[in-house]
Image (cartoon, coloured by chain):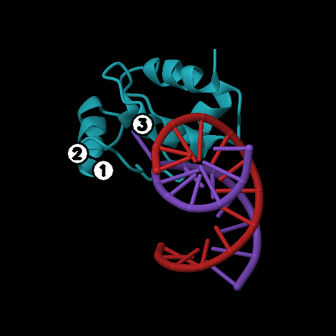
Chain colours: A cyan, B purple, C red
Amino acid sequence: MTFTDKVKNIVAAIPKGKMLTYKQVAEKAGSPNAARAVGSIMKQNYDPKIPCHRVVRSDGIIGEYNRGGREEKIRKLKREGAIK
DNA sequence: TAGTTGACCGGAA
DNA sequence: ATTCCGGCCAACT
């Protein structure tokens, strides 16, 4: 199980209406300081089973998204009730 | 193999 | 509050 695979599993396991930060994911994956790598991975490995829109920055900012931009990401989160 | 890039983070200016 | 800078890590070239 590589770091990348762990990250995928973790993100795939995020419940509806919940949000995790890249930092949190990196931590759970075993590398507390690999937040940047997490984003990199998500960017290149998008899978429909992986709700990357539920992963945000630790600042509370939504961050980037490769499927319609931040707007779409925000929309999804709002629809799930994760944010206002 | 080495250098660059980026969906990040935290602290400093 | 905003912008800048160094550090981290995987993927890309």
- Residue type indicated by callout 1: Arg
Query: Secondary structure beneath disc 1?
Result: helix
Q: Would you call the spot at circle 3 few (<14 residues within 10 Å), some (14-19), or many (20 or more)?
A: few
Closer to the eye: label 2 or 1: 2
CA–CA distance between discs 1 and 3?
A: 17 Å
Residue A21, can we see it?
no
The disc numbered 3 marks a residue on which chain?
A
Residue A68: mark: 2
Q: Position of residue C11 (x, y in %)?
A: 51, 37
Q: Is residue A71 left or right of residue B1?
A: left
In front here: A84 or A14?
Answer: A14
Q: Nearer the viewer, residue A19 or C6?
A: C6
Residue A68 in the image, given as x and y percentages of width and height: 22, 45
Say what amino acid the circle numbered 3 marks. Answer: Gln
Residue A40 in percent (x, y) is at: 50, 42
Q: Badge 3 is on which residue? A: A44
Q: Within 10 angstroms of label 2, few (less than 14), some, or many (20 or more) residues?
A: few
Gap in angstroms between the C-alphas marked 2 and 1: 7 Å
Q: Quadrant of the C terminus of chain A?
A: top left
The residues bearing labels 2 and 3 have C-alpha atoms spaced at a distance of 15 Å
The structure residue drawn at horizontal position 42% and vertical position 30%, both measured from the top left corner, is A45
Q: Are marks 2 and 3 in contact (CB under 8 Å)?
A: no
Q: Residues within 10 Å of mark 1 (few under 14, many from 20)?
A: some
Identify the residue at horizontal 34%, vertical 45% (top origin): A65
User: Under tag 3, what secondary structure?
Assistant: helix
Q: Amino acid at mark 2?
A: Gly
Q: Which residue is mark 1?
A: A70
Q: Do the residues marked 2 and 3 share a common chain? A: yes
Vertical order, A75 against A4 (above or below):
below
User: Which of the two residues, A16 or C3, is positioned nearer the viewer here?
Assistant: C3
Q: Please state which of the two labelled residues, at mark 2 or mark 3, is closer to the viewer.
A: 3
